[in-house]
Amino acid sequence: MNPRSRSSSDQERVTVDIVIFTIRDTELQVLLVRRGIPPFEGSWAIPGGFVLPNESLDDAARRELHEETGVEDVFLEQLYTFGDPERDPRGRVITVAYYALVSPDRAPLAGSDAAEARWWPAAHTPAPLAFDHDAIVATALERLRGKLTYTAIGFELLPKKFTLSQLQRVHEAILGEPLDKRNFRKRVDALGVVRPLKESVNPGAGRPAQLFSFRRSKTSERE
Amino acid sequence: MNPRSRSSSDQERVTVDIVIFTIRDTELQVLLVRRGIPPFEGSWAIPGGFVLPNESLDDAARRELHEETGVEDVFLEQLYTFGDPERDPRGRVITVAYYALVSPDRAPLAGSDAAEARWWPAAHTPAPLAFDHDAIVATALERLRGKLTYTAIGFELLPKKFTLSQLQRVHEAILGEPLDKRNFRKRVDALGVVRPLKESVNPGAGRPAQLFSFRRSKTSERE
DNA sequence: GCAAAAGTGTTCAGCTTACACCCATGG
DNA sequence: CCATGGGTGTAAGCTGAACACTTTTGC
C-alpha cells in the first residue's frame, strides 16, 4: 500500500485452502486429499488452490469448494491467513484459510475429481498432514467450537429439515462431549433461529420427532 | 496447494496493512498516513507495505509497525485478509490486515518517517479513506470492541503502570459509553490480570490512586 | 406391554446490573 | 473546608447447570 516500503520481489503466490467439515456417523469429519506429487507426496492435505487473478478470496474459496465437492451455497467463512516463509518447501506461498460446513446429504462420499480424496475424523487425521495443515485444521476446529458457544451453527451441517435431536448430536460431535437435552433445547429455542414445521418424522423406533428448519441469512459472510 | 488447480497467473501482490490504535485525550485514535502519489493521492490511508520474501506475515506487520511508529513489542494481531480484485485500481493486491494497540507514552506524536502522518479519532476518520481502508478500520473496531467483552485488553493501550480509572477510561473510549465504576473494578479483579504495585500516584487533585501492572503473556499471538 | 427415542419444568448457584456513600489528598 | 477524583458493598434479576419423568410410536 505504502509506496516507500515496496520490496525488491513483491510477487507472492497466494492460495486458498479450505477445511471442509461434515458430519458422518455422528462424528465430525474433514475432507482430505492425498497428494500425488512432491512436496509431501503421499501425505494428506486439505483441498485448496491458487487464487485466480480476477476473483475475490471468497470467490476463490467458493470455487475450490465447488470443484472439490460439487456443493454450492453452504456456510463458508474466512479463518486465518498463514504466511510463514517456510510453510511450503518450494518457496513462498501464502494461504488464506477458510472453513466450510457441508451437510452429509449434500456432501459426496468423497471428492468429486480424480484425486484420491476422503473424509477423516476431525479428531484423528492421518498425521502429519502436508505443509502446515495440521495447524490450519486445529485453528478451524477451535473456531468452530468457539462459535457453538454463542450460535447454533450446527444447522449448517444438517439437511434443511432436521430434528432437535439431530442438531444436538451435531453439537456433541463438534464439542466432543454430551449435552443435556433439556438445556440444549431451551438454548436453541432462546436463540430463536429454528422454526417448527408441520411435519414429523419417525426415525424407526420411538416417538416421532418434530421437524424444524432454520432461517439462513446469508451463505458466506464476514465474522 | 493443490497442483491441479493452479492458475495461469499465480503471482499476486501481498501487503500487510495495520490499523494502529492509541488513546489520546481519552479518545480512541488511529494512525493514518496521507498518500503522496496516486492512486488515492491526497487521501488518508492506514500504514502498510509489501511483505518481504523471507519474513512471516507477523514479522512483516511488526516491521511495518516499527518503521511507522518506532515502537516494538506491543499488542499486534491478525485481523482479516481483504482480497477483492477491485480494491486497488492498479491491479490485484491482497492485503493481510492487522491491528495494533500502542500506549500513548510510547506512540510518537505522529509517524516517524517523512510521510505526512497523524492520529485521527477512530470514530471520525477523514472519509473516505484510500482503497477499502474504511472497511478495514471498521472491522478492527468491531474486533476490538468484541474483545473487551471477554478480556481487559485496554491494558495494551496504557503505560506499564496504570490506575484502574485510567483503564476504565480506555474501555469507555473504545466502547463509546460510560461504565459503572464498581462493576468495572469487580470485573477487572475477577479476570485476575492486574497486580497492585506498592506505589501510588497523585494525579493532581483528589485522593492518590493505586498503581497496577499486568502480566503480558506474549506480544503477538494467534487469536 | 415393552423398548426406544421425543419431549417437558423446576430448583439452585453464580454472575451481572443497578445503585450511593465515605476516603485521601491539594489548594 | 471544599473540591476532586479514588475507593468500596449489597440487593435484585437473570442466566446457566443439574436433574427425572411422561409421551408416542413400532414391534
Image (cartoon, coloured by chain):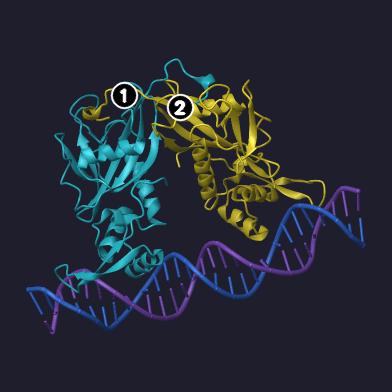
Chain colours: A yellow, B cyan, C blue, D purple
State how far apart marks 1 and 2 are (Cα): 16 Å
Residue A108 position in % (x across, y down)? 67, 30
Q: Secondary structure at mark 2?
A: strand
Residue B93: mark in rendering: none
Residue type beneath disc 1: Asp
The number of callouts visible is 2
Residue at image position (25%, 36%) is B47
Q: Chain of mark 2?
A: A
Figure check: B145 above or below B37: below
Residue at image position (81%, 52%) is A206
Residue A107 position in % (x across, y down)? 65, 32
Kindly indicate whether the residue at mark 2 contacts the one at mark 1 (C-beta within 8 angstroms). Answer: no
Frontmost residue, D2 versus C4: C4
Is residue B112 in view? Answer: yes
Residue type beneath disc 2: Thr
Figure check: B30 above or below B57: below
Q: Secondary structure at mark 1?
A: loop
Tag 1 and tag 2 share a subunit: yes
Residue at image position (16%, 34%) is B115
Frontmost residue, A39 versus A23: A39
* Quadrant of the rendered image containing residue A180: bottom right
Q: Chain of mark 1?
A: A
Q: Which residue is mark 1?
A: A10
Lower sequence index among marks 1 and 2: 1
Is residue A76 in view? Answer: no
Residue A92 position in % (x across, y down)? 39, 27
For mark 1, does the 10 Å Cα neighbourhood hold few (<14), some (14 to 19), or many (20 or more) residues?
Answer: some
Q: Which residue is mark 2?
A: A15
* Quadrant of the rendered image containing residue B92: top left
